[in-house]
Image (tube, rainbow, N blue to C red):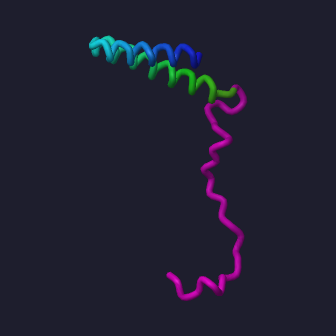
Amino acid sequence: MMLAIFVTLLAALTLAWVGKRPLALGVLALCLGLSVWLFLWEVWSPQTGFRMPWIDTRLDLPPDLPPDPAVRGRA
């Protein structure tokens, strides 16, 4: 699938280089669509849906630590 994305991107760049801008923009939109489709296909899981466990956005507060004497006076 990555090969298809790279080929469409190369085709868009080549079309833009030879002066066929409207066609190049269409192929570029196709490349973007393929990229988004591949990302969603890679991320989706039957067990968790679209959850990405490697991106944990929950706030983990550090344990209460005594104040550091070296930092006193700074604010």
- Where is residue 44 shown, x and y percent of the image? 64, 27
Q: Is residue 35 left or right of residue 63?
A: left
Residue at x 32%, y 17% (from the top left corner): 16
Quadrant occupied by the N terminus: top right
- The residue nearer to you, when weighing 70 against 67, is 70
User: In the rendered view, does 67 fall on the left or right side of 18?
Assistant: right
Q: Quadrant of residue 30?
A: top left
Rendered position, 70 above or below 32: below
Q: Residue at x 58, y 87 (%)?
A: 72
In the foreground, 26 or 65: 26
Q: Is residue 66 left or right of residue 8?
A: right
| Residue 34 on image: x %, y % | 50, 18
Magenta run includes residue 56: yes
Position of residue 73 measured from the top left corner of the image (x, y, whole percent)? 54, 88
Residue 2's image quarter? Answer: top right
Q: Which residues are magenta?
A: 46-75
Residue 71: percent from left, percent from top: 60, 83
Viewer-closest of 47 and 9: 9
- Which residue is found at the position 70% from the left and 81% from the top? 66
Instruction: Please tell me whether residue 17 belongs to the stretch shown in magenta.
Output: no
Answer above or below: position of 48 versus 7: below
Q: How many marks?
A: 0
The secondary structure that dominates the magenta segment is: loop
Furthest residue to the front?
18
* Closer to the camera in the image, 59 or 18: 18
